[in-house]
Amino acid sequence: QVAAMDDQPLKGIRLVLTAGPTRESLDPVRYITNHSSGRMGFAIAESAARQGADVTLVAGPVSLPTPNGVQRVDVETAEDMQKAVDEALTNGTDWFVATAAVADYRPVTRSESKIKKNKDSAPVIELQQNPDILASVAARKQNRPFTVGFAAETNNVSDYAKDKLKRKNLDMIVANDVSAPDIGFNSDRNAVEVFWEGGSQKYDARSKTELATDLLTLIHKRSRA
Ligand code: CTP
Ligand code: CA
């Protein structure tokens, strides 16, 4: 069988993605994380590979199968994710898409052994900032890919998203309202609004698979604009 030419519209595109949460350990049995399922990022990776792109997916701890044809790098912490992204990005990387819900902070100390309960006092966990992976990629002076961020917000969604677009020097940001019932974080469906300098585009609720393909079409168009 011969595929039609249009089946591979992303042939020649090199894409690096982050997906899922990160996990920041306190001790060998406990950690700080968030509700990200990784599904949006995996859906984009799958759609891009199906359309002929060369895809590297840097994934935090999620329970999802690796999409066909996708090169997957598993990581746990934000610092590991930063390292894996730096290794995955090459001169030839065309697009960087950050869907991961990176933990903003990590514990200052990680105990080698299980922390024991103290009857008389509750512990205070001291945290420090994690690196901002997306901002570090967008700040590159050389070999900077077309850089796309995601903003999961519960309120003032478009204002916060537009602020991140500017502050992190992104080419595009995908905003979604995670307070809306049945879409976003742990759902199969999502509704988003995408912002770039001087424009925006709304996508009503649809499957993450369908949205992934729509977003890739928009990224393809905007990255050539
Ligand atoms: N991001 C990242 N590294 C971080 C934090 C965020 O790469 N340490 C990326 C996310 O993958 C996402 C975008 O930045 O694409 C926005 O993440 P978000 O958590 O909404 O932004 P923050 O700047 O951390 O702002 P806040 O959590 O205060 O809303
Ligand atoms: Ca954050």
Image (spheres, helix red, strand yellow):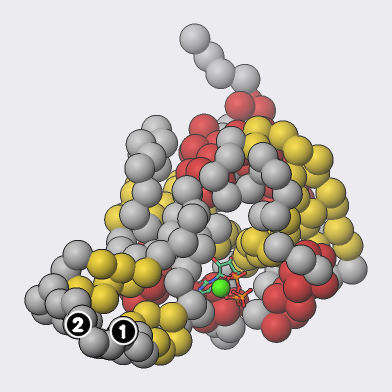
Looking at the rendering, which quadrant does residue 199 occupy? bottom right
x 37%, y 80%: residue: 106
Q: Is residue 94 visible?
A: no
223 sits left or right of 50 in the view: right
Q: Which mark is residue 203?
A: none
Q: Residue furthest top?
A: 1
Which residue is the site of mark 1?
122
Instruction: Decide: is 64 above or below 222.
Output: above
Q: Could you say where residue 18 lies in the image, as x and y percent from the top left? A: 47, 59
x 31%, y 61%: residue: 75
The total of numbered circles placed on residues is 2
Rate crowding at label 1 as few (under 14), some (14 to 19) or many (20 or more) other CA atoms within 10 Å.
few
Q: Indicate the amino acid at tag 1.
A: Ala
Which residue is the site of mark 2?
118
Q: Could you say where residue 169 lies in the image, as x and y percent from the top left? A: 68, 79
Instruction: Decide: is 27 above or below 22.
Output: below
- Circles 2 and 1, Cβ within 8 Å, touching? The answer is yes
Q: At numbered mark 2, what does the secondary structure look like: helix, strand or loop?
A: loop
Image quadrant occupied by the C terminus: bottom right
